[in-house]
């Protein structure tokens, strides 16, 4: 990706891996799919990546034209990283790769997910067929993060922001939410154990979970 290492292969797939195939590179892209982030935000989302490695990946991705850096206007005036238009096209790659990886018999939720990872997982697993004509409007609160989730006419919108017309406001953490959406844990159990709070219609979260089926595991 930085030019020091290359597959030296004219295949476009090989060239793509030259650009985003280094360890952590695609996960940096994943962290930026929902919007710009500061370096400290990226560190929080990728705790396994050391600061030097993360800084190098960001430089490589900038050089490749996948990521750009800018300074927010005052009063924030913070430097943030964000995907370029071309870089945003990698969301489709991540979704396809995520669905493929979810079919691995060895896939597990034990290692946990970050806040943005749960939202991207919703986009990955959403099934228009399973959704049918059902509607869901949720406000999700995970720590300092606020997300809105809407399903209408077989289309999912899951992104940063508040949902003013929420059927339910769900306050939780990524692990508890993932356990409800994909681990078969009833929301009532998560609420009873203090891992989740639901204001409004508790059935809204169950309806959402039914729209996010995991793909069948691959055969041996």
Image (cartoon, rainbow, N blue to C red):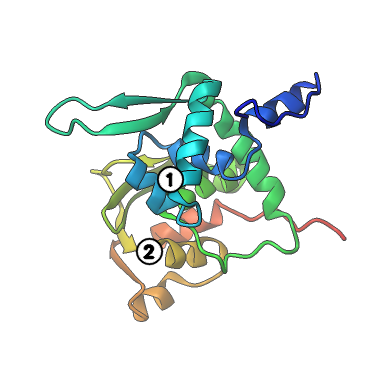
What label sits on residue 135 in the rendered view? 1
Residue 154 in view, yes or no: no
Residue 79 image point, x, y percent = 28, 32
The number of numbered badges drawn on the structure is 2
Q: Is residue 179 left or right of residue 149?
A: right
**Residue 193 % position (x, y):** 37, 81
Q: Of residues 158 and 110, which is closer to you in this image? A: 110
| Nearer to us: label 2 or label 1 | 2
Front residue of 96/130: it is 96
Q: Give the x, y percent position of residue 16.
A: 68, 27
User: 69 left or right of 109?
Assistant: left
* 157 over 196 or under it: above or below: above
Q: Badge 2 local density, few (<14 within 10 Å), some, or many (20+)? A: some
Quadrant for the C terminus in the image: bottom right
Q: Quadrant of residue 197?
A: bottom left
Residue 14 place in picture, x, y as percent? 76, 28
**Relative to the observer, which residue lies in front, 111 or 164?**
111
Q: Is residue 9 visible?
A: yes
Q: Which residue is mark 2?
A: 173
Q: Secondary structure at mark 1?
A: loop
Q: Residue at x 63, y 46 (%)?
A: 98
């Amino acid at each position: 990706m930085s030019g020091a290492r290359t597959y030296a292969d004219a295949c476009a797939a090989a060239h793509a891996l030259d650009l985003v195939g280094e360890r952590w590179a695609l996960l940096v892209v994943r962290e930026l799919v929902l919007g710009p982030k500061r370096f400290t935000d990226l560190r929080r989302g990728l705790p396994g990546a050391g600061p030097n490695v993360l800084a190098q990946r960001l430089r490589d991705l900038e050089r490749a034209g996948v990521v750009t850096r800018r300074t927010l206007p005052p009063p924030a005036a913070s430097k943030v990283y964000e995907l370029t238009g071309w870089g945003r096209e990698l969301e489709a790659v991540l979704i396809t790769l995520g669905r493929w990886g979810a079919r691995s018999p060895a896939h597990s939720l034990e290692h946990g997910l970050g806040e943005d990872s749960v939202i991207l997982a919703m986009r990955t697993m959403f099934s228009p067929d399973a959704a049918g004509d059902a509607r869901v409007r949720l406000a999700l609160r995970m720590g300092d993060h606020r997300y809105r989730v809407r399903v209408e006419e077989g289309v999912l919108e899951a992104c940063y922001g508040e949902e003013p017309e929420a059927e339910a406001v769900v306050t939780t953490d990524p692990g508890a939410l993932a356990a409800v959406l994909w681990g078969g844990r009833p929301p009532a159990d998560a609420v009873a154990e203090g891992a989740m709070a639901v204001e409004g219609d508790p059935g809204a979260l169950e309806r959402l979970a039914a729209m996010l089926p995991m793909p069948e595991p691959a055969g041996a």
